[in-house]
Amino acid sequence: MAVQEQRANNTLEQYIAAVRSVWGDGKDPQLPFKVKALMEKLFASTSPDDPWMAELIREGKPSRELYRDPDYGFIQMGHVHKQGHGNLPHDHGPCWVVYGAYSGVTEITKYKRTDDGSEPGKAALEKDRLDRLTPGVVVPYLRGDIHSTNAVQGPAVVFRFLSYDLEKIERYRYNPEKGTMVKV
Ligand SMILES: [Fe+2]
């Protein structure tokens, strides 16, 4: 049964139903921006005392799958990152991703490749943009965007919407100092 046909019991379920209702064939280039707007609405309408959010915060897990869509394949993750939690630059292959801060501050650096990609295992990166995700700020990263995250003020409750399961696609992690890239 489709989620939007059920009664949404909380703001998370309302958000999921709204994403499903705009999904269509999943190919609309505006979709990442539509999900961004819906996630902003989710954050604005959710209190830290709402039972589902209170549980996420109380458990404090670095990574939790909150929802996986049985029809469209998108996934909503919830993360609680300690201050200083970060990762190396990576891409999400053919997927797009929407990062949102519910609490704390997370900085996300976006990179551009300056090499031509002709040498296997090598990649030269240059910093392109720094996004500062303060509470309520949501930013989409489109297919192929290379980025790294850093929780500069924690604990940071971060929502990550994945257009598809990252375990099922080819993607890479980059080491800007060494100029290398490896398959994740
Ligand atoms: Fe990412």
Image (cartoon, rainbow, N blue to C red):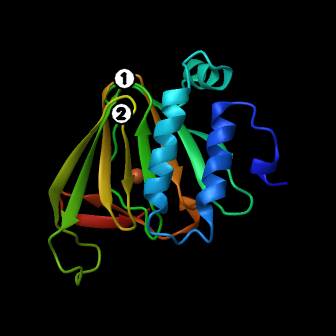
Q: Can residue 83 be seen by looking at this rendering?
A: yes
The residue sitting at the right extreme is 1
x 67%, y 20%: residue: 51
Asked if the residue at label 1 sits under 8 Å from ligand 1, the reply is no
Q: Position of residue 90 (x, y in %)?
A: 35, 57
179 left or right of 16 in image? left
Q: Which quadrant, please, contains the C terminus? A: bottom left
Q: Earlier in the sequence, mark 1 or mark 2?
A: 2
Q: Which mark is residue 135?
A: none
Task: Tell me, yes or no, whether the two marked residues, 1 and 2, touch with CB atoms within 8 Å.
Answer: yes
In this figure, which residue is indicated by the disc labeled 1? 154
User: Which type of secondary structure does the marked residue at label 1 adopt?
Assistant: loop
- Mark 2 residue type: His
118 left or right of 5 in image? left
x 17%, y 67%: residue: 124
In this figure, which residue is indicated by the disc labeled 2? 85
Q: Position of residue 10 (x, y in %)?
A: 69, 30
Q: Position of residue 149 (x, y in %)?
A: 32, 43
Mark 1 is surrounded, within 10 Å at the Cα level, by few (under 14), some (14 to 19) or many (20 or more) other residues, namely some
- Mark 1 residue type: Gly
Name the one closer to the observer, 153 or 141: 141
Rendered view: 98 above or below 163 = above
